[in-house]
Amino acid sequence: MGAIFKKELYIYYFTPFGYIFSGLFLLFCGIIFSFYNLSGSRADILGMLGALNMVSIVIFPILTMKLLAEEKKSSTDQLLFTSPVTVTSIIIGKYLAALFVFLITLASTGVFTVFIAIFGDTSLGAIIGPYIGFSLLGAAYIAICLFASSLTENQVTSAILGFGFLFGFMLIGFLSNSMPWPFMNKALKAIAILSKYDEFSNGVLRISPLVYYLSFTVVFLYLTVQVVEHRLNDKEA
């Protein structure tokens, strides 16, 4: 797992992918911060991270689109997945590399938080809560997009699938608020990935949203492993 993590991290920072993701992420942060916080004279981090929820469905697929699709296209997946390392370890190693790039990029937005803390009157919980929530949300997004990458050998198709999945989960959240039937409302909210983020954005730290996002992440990592193992078994048959 460690070797896979280092390999993917090396690729991220010695190819454009890592820089494109970080550049787009920070660019959007800067634009949102300028309009929401500076022009709007608002001393909170909610606007920036809240708006990032919307653009994340575009930039996260870029981060993950090559992780498995490229291996499959170049046929190096056979060599990689038949090595002594288990499929699960390989998937987790790739996932952790993407997660590391995301968290480092997110940490870089701390400069905006410093400005808010200096010039605004905001509590520590109002800053930490949204950051924890967005970190967990991003972790789930990466797992979903990694699953999308396992379904195809084309990077562009992988990105489109990742966007489609994330947009679908976001759309479920919007639909849940318009359902006339209470049971449908509750059912949709249970799988609406943004529904639990609101608790963090309010500075509330509870166990249930943490478990929700970790479970969401584990489920999609498990599905990714199953897809890869199924493909390998088909090739061996």
Image (cartoon, grey):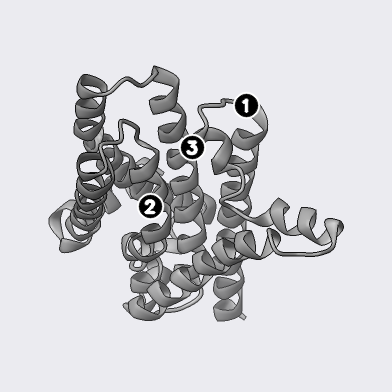
Vertical placement of 46 versus 60: above or below? above
* Label 3 CA crowd tier, 10 Å (few <14, some 14–19, many 20+): many
Q: Compared to 182, does 180 lie above or below?
A: below
Instruction: Identify the secondary structure beneath mark 1.
Output: loop
Query: Can you identify the residue that label 3 sits on?
Result: 133
Residue 59 point in image, percent of width and height: 33, 61
Asked whether the beta carbons under mark 3 and mark 1 sit within 8 Å of each other, the answer is: no
Calculate the distance from the C-alpha at mark 2 to the C-alpha at mark 1: 23 Å
Q: Earlier in the sequence, mark 2 or mark 1?
A: 2
Neighbours of disc 2 within 10 Å: few (<14), some (14-19), many (20+): some
Q: Quadrant of the C terminus?
A: bottom right
> Of tags 2 and 3, which is closer to the observer?
2
Who comes first in sequence, dot 2 or dot 3? 2
Instruction: Give how far across and how far down residue 163 sits, in percent.
Output: 44, 70
Residue 166 relative to residue 18: left or right: right
Quarter of the image with the N terminus in it: top left
Amino acid, disc 3: Gly
- SS class of the residue under badge 3? helix
Residue corresponding to mark 2: 51
Q: Position of residue 58 (x, y in %)?
A: 36, 66
Q: What mark, if any, has residue 5 been given in the picture?
A: none
Label 3 and label 1: CA atoms lie apart by: 11 Å
Amino acid under disc 1: Arg
Horizontal relation, residue 116 to residue 81: left or right: left
Residue in the image at 61% along x and 71% along y: 230
> Badge 1 is on which residue?
206
Q: Amino acid at mark 2?
A: Ala
Q: Is residue 84 visible?
A: no
Q: Secondary structure at mark 2?
A: helix
Which residue corresponds to the image point at 27% horizontal and 39% vertical from the top-left?
104
